[in-house]
Amino acid sequence: MRALHVRREGTLEYEAALALQHELVAMRQRGEGQDTLLLLEHPNVFTLGRRRTSEQNVLMPGDIPVVQVERGGDVTWHGPGQLVGYPILALEEEERDIHAVLRRLEDAMIAVLGRCGLQAGRREKFTGVWCQGRKLVSLGVAVREWVTFHGFAINVDCGLDGFARINPCGLESQVMGSVESLGGTVPSPDELMEWAAIEVAAAFERSLV
């Protein structure tokens, strides 16, 4: 079984995290380094995916930075109280299906939310993880030479005001929720990162380092 190295980066500016992802992706493309899961939190930021409507769905950015990125999907918000994970994985031949990568990430996030006491699942025609009609996990990935980057964001105990300034993933902001807002158990940051690492490793059949 291939290894998955976990790096806990604390709070990291979005541009710094993106540069780190690019560095790790380039290493994996050269056959260097190892598969890595970055776990961190961002200061307030809006990110725009490749969907054509993403810029139009930024309604009132105010003083929050807006960053265009390579991942799929529309606009989303990142900020305090959210756990963000970026799996940098060199996909084996049998893993090279971007839709399957998204489904595996959804499986991992459903399991994490289950550990928080929430019965979560998918919603037909939408990427992400939902519970009680609310979206708790946003997903968006990119692939370069079959190395993945970008990833997931779990709304844990964040305020939801940031989402009110956009149409998150093209949806109305009221659809967003958090573990806290739905009455789930909010674990400590260390415990949540441990759960996320365990479930991502299991979903991609990697062993944790």
Image (cartoon, helix red, strand yellow):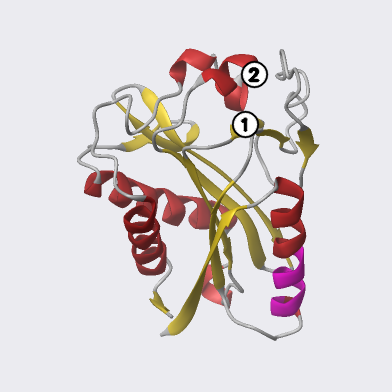
The residue carrying pointer 2 sits among few (fewer than 14), some (14 to 19) or many (20 or more) residues within 10 Å by Cα, namely many
Whole-angstrom CA distance, mark 1 to mark 2, is: 8 Å
Which comes before the other along the chain, label 1 or label 2?
A: 1
**Front position in the image: 84 or 158:** 158
- Are the two marked residues, 1 and 2, in contact with CB atoms closer than 8 angstroms? yes
Q: Which residue is mark 2?
A: 166
Q: Answer left or right for 209 relative to 49.
A: left
Instruction: Kindly identify the amino acid type of the residue bearing the numbered disc 2.
Output: Ile
Q: Is residue 57 magenta?
A: no
Secondary element at image label 1: strand
Query: Which x, y percent locates residue 9?
Result: 57, 61
| Mark sitting on residue 88 | none
Which residue is at a point 70% across and 19% down the rendered structure image? 57
- By secondary structure, the bulk of the magenta-drawn segment is best described as helix
**Front position in the image: 145 or 34:** 34
Magenta stretch?
Answer: 22-28
Q: Give the vertical position of 174 relative to 27 (above or below).
A: above
**Front position in the image: 104 or 9:** 9
Which residue is at a point 47% across and 82% down the rendered structure image? 3
Q: Which residue is mark 1?
A: 76
